[in-house]
Amino acid sequence: MSLSAILSIRSISKSYGAIQALKGVSFDVPEGCVYGVLGPNGSGKTTLLGIILDVLQANGGSYQWFGGVANDASRKQIGSLLETPNFYHYLSAYDNLAVTAKIRGKGDTDRNAVLGQVGLLERKDSKFQTFSLGMKQRLAIGAALLGGPRVLVFDEPTNGLDPAGIAEIRELILKLNREGITIIIASHLLDEIEKVCTHVAILKRGTLLLNGPVNEVLVNEDQVEVMAQDMAGLKNALQAMPGIVKMTNRERFLMLTCDKGIETFHVNDYCIKKGIVLTHLAMKRKSLEAKFMELTN
Ligand code: ADP
């Protein structure tokens, strides 16, 4: 385990009968980050969160919180939101938190502090039924904050929200992280992970495809599309061009995956110097969406 890991997951596997939901998943969550567990529906995200929260038992592998085996003391430092709590429509935000605290066996002395953290202190006496979708979800996050956890674990925190609600939750997640809370989020939405997470682990059918800092793992890839009359000569010449990482044939074109900083005019310039006249030259920006689809489909 690396020194700063708040959670360390090692070779976790889990089967439901014949369905293997997780196949030996390992990664570390560094303290202070917003860690996204990203993958399409059915890839094993909820199962993984269930295991690290002791709701489900793994068939193999292990995990450590704060450098040790999970125990009552470590569990107190973890707040989670796997499903929206059943709030009572006719009760106020303040009273609903008392009910949730009681159900979860947590103290409720910090209800005002928690309501302040999620921006609902001024509405603490309003009935839950008067809240917008975003406010309802903020209250659910407030419930996870009872007891002052060091880590928050969320499963699809923006599911079912309208765009305004999604924006509110994003802002709140970033704010809580700035206050020093490490946050782990499972989501099938690339957009959500890209906008709030510092780190990501991508799952596909229970297998970890890749993990690491978002700005390393989810980089936009640019490709240059070229064609010439003499395709063999073109390929041969470009093989020696510095900054070209990969060449693939796509339909009639040659697709060049390039290092950052290589633009179309560099390719054109190089080809002219080699005596090759390009009949087609275009920059294709490969979106993250396309890359994510490619990884997970
Ligand atoms: P995700 O959260 O990424 O959508 P899940 O962890 O919910 O993925 O599911 C992973 C796989 O395990 C899926 O194939 C799902 O159908 C299966 N699965 C999840 N829970 C159960 C269960 N209680 N019984 C049987 N299969 C399950």
Image (tube, helix red, strand yellow):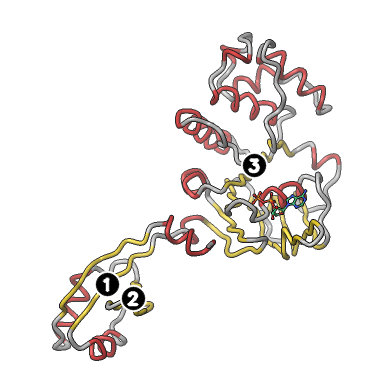
**Which quadrant of the rendered structure holds the N terminus?**
bottom right
Please report the residue visible at 22 percent of the width from the left and 78 percent of the height from the top: 227
- The secondary structure type at the circle numbered 3 is strand
Residue beneath disc 3: 155
- Residue 218 in percent (x, y) is at 47, 58
Q: Residues within 10 Å of mark 2 (few under 14, many from 20)?
A: few
Residue beneath disc 2: 250
Q: Sequence order check: which comes first, mark 2 or mark 1? A: 1
Is residue 99 depicted above or below 151 in this figure? Answer: above
Q: Nearer the viewer, mark 3 or mark 2?
A: 2
**Drawn side of residue 276 relative to residue 5, left or right:** left
Three-letter amino acid code at the position of disc 2:
Arg
- Residue 25 in percent (x, y) is at 70, 62
Three-letter amino acid code at the position of disc 1:
Glu
Please report the residue visible at 68 percent of the width from the left and 40 percent of the height from the top: 151
Residue beneath disc 1: 225
Q: CA distance from mark 2 to mark 1?
A: 9 Å
Is residue 183 depicted above or below 297 in this figure? Answer: above
Q: Sequence order check: which comes first, mark 1 or mark 3? A: 3
Q: Residues within 10 Å of mark 1 (few under 14, many from 20)?
A: many
Q: Sequence order check: which comes first, mark 3 or mark 2? A: 3
Q: Is mark 3 within 8 Å of ligand 1?
A: yes
Question: Do labels 2 and 1 touch, CB within 8 Å?
Answer: yes
